[in-house]
Image (cartoon, rainbow, N blue to C red):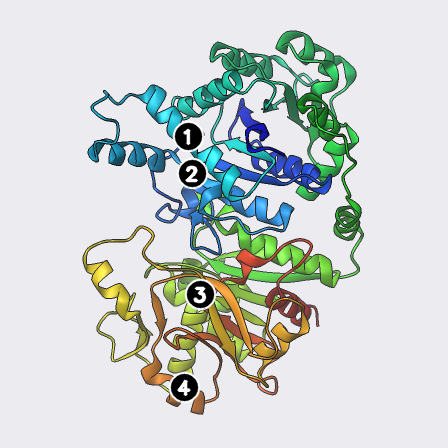
Amino acid sequence: MPRNKTKYIFVSGGVISGIGKGNVAASIALLLKQAGYSVTPIKFENYLNMDSGTINPIEHGDPFLCEDGTEADMDIGTYEKFLSEDMTRDNFVTMGQVYKAVIDRERRFEYNGEDVEAIPHITDEIISRIDNVARVKNAEIVVIELGGTAGEYQNLFYYEASRIMTFKKPGDVLHIHVSYVPTPPHLGEPKTKPTQLSVRTLNSMGIQPDFIVARSEKMLDKRRKDRLALFCNVHPEDVVSNPDLKTVYEIPLVLQEQGIGTRIMEKFGLRKKEPDLKDWKKLVDKILVKKKKTIEIAIVGKYFGTGDYELRDSYAALFDAISHASWEVGVDVKTHWVNSEEVEKKGVKEVIGKPDGIIVPIGWGERGVEGKITAASYAREHKIPYLGLCYGMQLAVVAFARDILGWKDAHTVECMPNCKHPVISLIPKQKDLMERRAYGGTMRLGKWDAKIKPGTRAFEIYKKYDGFIDEKTGLTSERHRHRYEFNNKYAEEIEKAGLTISARSVVESLVEIIELPKDKHPFYLGTQGHPEYKSRPLKPHPVFLAFIEACSQ
């Protein structure tokens, strides 16, 4: 397909935030990819942050970490999971990036004395990012997810860019509006007025949606579809129902049943091809089949609460990785969210109980740290399968040093800079950055190669599954997001005491994986990397598969 014939699909949201635009955008991209087209998604975020890395996960969910070190929105993770492809910095844009690019260009006098304005300069930068991802990814179709909700002032320029592109590329741009159709309990019927008003907002910006994807509790009936078609100026067959489902991975199948993929191809004048969804259907069957066993896993963290409510999104990638592995193993998982501060106040046994497994995930800072260290000790002493991720690996080392070596003051310098036994220390290259408060995008980020020691549990786990280790070299790689590391000064003493260092990085020889031998513990493993970000529904990560298998036994 010639470059000037690239097709563009904008996906916007209406009525409420968190409506599921990312799942719809990913599902549409999957349908078109499985029909044989080259597709890439791109997410535009409203905030002025340069990336998601400095945002509290309670505020905007778990930042998703890419292979190239990009700290992105969770929807980038959704794209990776649906498309089974690595996303990069080209697939993720924030309003902060857009503004900075324009201002930097003005400072370099690249506008040749023009007065720099929101339109056309901001919108031109947005459009250039879209054209860039099409070029870099060699995409025939670009699916563009617009962050936020129609009517917000923060995303106005994204919508203006959509309007301009529609005007300048007639026939090559479609707009899909994902909107909420509530069913108030006191009325008992779906109400279309909120979506009508949301589409009116789009119309006021010069945008007429080509499709409406209606999020609702149940499939919309013909009456509701006809009303949306009439008042929103779309064909009834272009009103697509997206009801609540048992798993988001059903969405592509539900959308395909209603013919949205075929209609998109028709509107673009593309050759209509049926998507190959055999593997996806097998996945959904695997998810929905009744499991014979349920296991309980305690997640000991501190980013669960927002006001009076609890959030799954703070550890979204972790929960997804657990789910992917549990479907493959064939068990249901009940997750017990444990606030590590409660462990400190009430005691580990009272708060955690006797789960089938314990995970201490990514985290930062001193708050709740003793509760996490106690959880790591509790899992080791009571032979409960344990998985430590990043901070969870570091604190497992602290717990071991205190309990087994008797170094009661052992700690991470992140929490106790002047401790006598700093078993976790600051990576030397990070010292200057920290002193300058250069926090954004400066951690050890992205893919780093590591060599796994043959004969270890980690080697056995990675070797068991294709594509995760080079058996000749023993090399694998995980994504990283940290400033602190296992202090090599204490490596020899700690290993002599019984904790195995089973992997080190190729660069700088940093400790990547620690474990207890099989004869000492059923499963006790900590990884400095983040296997949760590489797990996909069609290819669960081996670390999580091994952990779930150990828990189920």
Quadrant including the C terminus: bottom right
Q: Earlier in the sequence, mark 4 or mark 3?
A: 3
Inter-mark Cα distance, 1 to 3:
35 Å
Instruction: Please report whichever mark, 4 or 2, sits nearer to the chain's N-terminal start.
Output: 2
- Furthest toward the front, the residue is 2
Q: Are marks 4 and 2 in contact (CB under 8 Å)?
A: no
The amino acid beneath tag 3 is Cys
Identify the amino acid type marked 4.
Answer: Ile
At which x and y percent is residue 479? Answer: 48, 61
* Crowdedness near tag 1: few (<14), some (14–19) or many (≥20) residues, C-alpha within 10 Å: many
- Distance from the alpha carbon under mark 2 to that under mark 3: 26 Å
Please name the residue that numbered disc 3 is placed on.
390
Mark 2 and mark 1 in contact? Answer it, CB < 8 Å: yes
* Quadrant in which residue 237 is drawn: top right
Residue 181 placement (x, y as % from top left) = 63, 21
Q: Residues within 10 Å of mark 3 (few under 14, many from 20)?
A: many
Q: Is residue 44 left or right of residue 228?
A: left
Crowd band around label 4 with a 10 angstrom C-alpha radius: few (<14), some (14–19), many (20+): some
Q: Is residue 53 visible?
A: yes
Identity of the residue drawn at 44% across and 41% down: 60
- Residue 126 is marked as 1
Mark 2 closeness class: few <14, some 14–19, many ≥20 residues within 10 Å = many
Q: Which one is in front in this view, the residue at disc 4 or the one at disc 1?
A: 1
Measured Cα–Cα span from mark 2 to mark 1: 9 Å
Residue placed under numbered mark 2 in the picture:
93
